Image: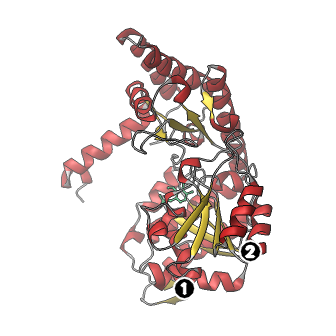
Amino acid sequence: ALLLEQVDSNVWKAIEAERGRQARSIELIASENFVSRAVLQAQGSVLTNKHAEGYPGARYYGGCSHADAVEILAIERAKALFNCRYANVQPHSGSQANQGVYLAFLEPGDKILGLDLRSGGHLTHGARVSLSGKWFQSVCYGVEPITELVDMDNVALIARKERPRLIIAGGSAYSRVIDFARFRDIADEVGAIFMADIAHVAGLVAGGVFPSPIPYAHVTTTTTHKTLRGPRGGMILSNDAEIAQQIDAAVFPGLQSGPLMHVISAKAVALGEALHPTFRTYAKAVLENARALCDRLAQGGLSVVSGGTDCHLGVIDLRPWGLTGKSAEMALDEIGITVNKNTVPNDNAAPLVASGIRVGSAACTSRGMGVDEFREIGDMILATLGGVRSGTMNAHTLKAIHQGVSNLTRRYPLPY
Ligand code: PLP
């Protein structure tokens, strides 16, 4: 059989170049990780050929017995890992998991309350440019200006005033513990549904180092590809039979048709890996490493939003250094450290410029790096951004930092 290289050298070259980029750079994007070879193998399997509309035992197509087997494995493992009674593993992405919840419980024009995008919320939590902000009336809570933490009394005040149909906790760039119990109390008080979106912290919840929303939320959504270290995809979890039934109907046939069976098989593999005791060690290391990195950046004079982190990510406010997120992202890219620009609380910069960067520890922890390496990475970031700030960066220093990146990535190779 002809291999990709022979059939389509252009695509093959791009994939190989990406493999090299991943191997040679320090990946600090908080929403990324490195899956195992087993996950990669399942995702690249013949299950991509299978159309399997419906759910295990109730499919609209023949030949689904093996598809059923992998989907049941994924569901049972998700339930065991998150200690919940129901799991839908079909959403193609985190966004579609959230849309599944909206389709199940909301009518167009209903009001939703979520964390403001600039304070770390996600697009799908009501941003104007997203379906969630176009089809629903979206209102938001922010973070308290001094502590940069979500102020639960303020969330309660807004909820009482606005009476939303759905309240969302969680985000993409909020690094602190979330008071899920209080969110549920507030939702109960105003008669709202409480949805927790743990897309970012799911692996930490699974690994026991971040509080679980499962006992409190009516419904919990997540991605499977961030700290959970699975294929790109989404999942919806709940403990209530009626809610689970509405979710299933919303995902299929409401929102999607054929599930991505190859991805679901990779989800099953990743969930199996996360059930292994070593995953708890991994989750603990992710947290320690994120704290080591944020502490080092703070010691070097950078401003860490909210003063630190309780998870895998940190948001750095670059306004005190007079830099933009865009310029920092570009400068770090040049030395082989990959981050993303990110808005910070009360940011006036456009999203494509932004006043901060977001860093995360999940991916490099998967390579085996520990606290010492993360401190070293912190020093490289400080040296680079310090050079840009003072205008003293020169080819010699740049080369020396780049060499440091190369040494680290060579010491902690990827398995593929
Ligand atoms: N929810 C949160 C909190 C996220 O950070 C993301 C990340 O992208 C999503 C949802 C959407 O996930 P996806 O990119 O898979 O649609």
x, y percentage for residue 353?
41, 39
Per the image, the residue denoted by label 2 is 190
In the image, 138: left or right of 336? Answer: right
Q: Mark 2: which amino acid?
A: Val
- Tell me the number on the disc at residue 191: none
x, y percentage for residue 415?
49, 41
Identify the residue at image location x=54%, y=73%: 70
- The colour scheme is secondary structure
Identify the residue at image location x=62%, y=65%: 113
Comes first in the chain, label 1 or label 2:
2
**Residue 320 in which image quadrant:** top right
Disc 1 or disc 2, which is closer to the eye? 2
Q: Nearer the viewer, residue 380 or 327?
A: 327
Query: Does the beta carbon at disc 2 come under 8 Å from ligand 1?
Result: no
Residue 404 appears in the rendering:
no
In the image, 344: left or right of 219? Answer: left
In the image, 312: left or right of 8? Answer: right
Per the image, the residue denoted by label 1 is 249
- Residue 263, above or below 391: below
Q: Nearer the viewer, residue 8 or 332?
A: 332
Q: Mark 1: which amino acid?
A: Ala
Identify the residue at image location x=68%, y=27%: 295
**Which quadrant, please, contains the C terminus?**
top left
x, y percentage for residue 46?
39, 68
**Residue 71 in which image quadrant:** bottom right
Marks 1 and 2 close (CB-CB < 8 Å): no
- At numbered mark 1, what does the secondary structure look like: helix, strand or loop? helix
Residue 185 appears in the rendering:
yes
Real-space Cα separation, disc 1 to disc 2, in angstroms? 26 Å
**Which quadrant, please, contains the N terminus?**
bottom left
Q: How many numbered dots are placed on residues in this image?
A: 2
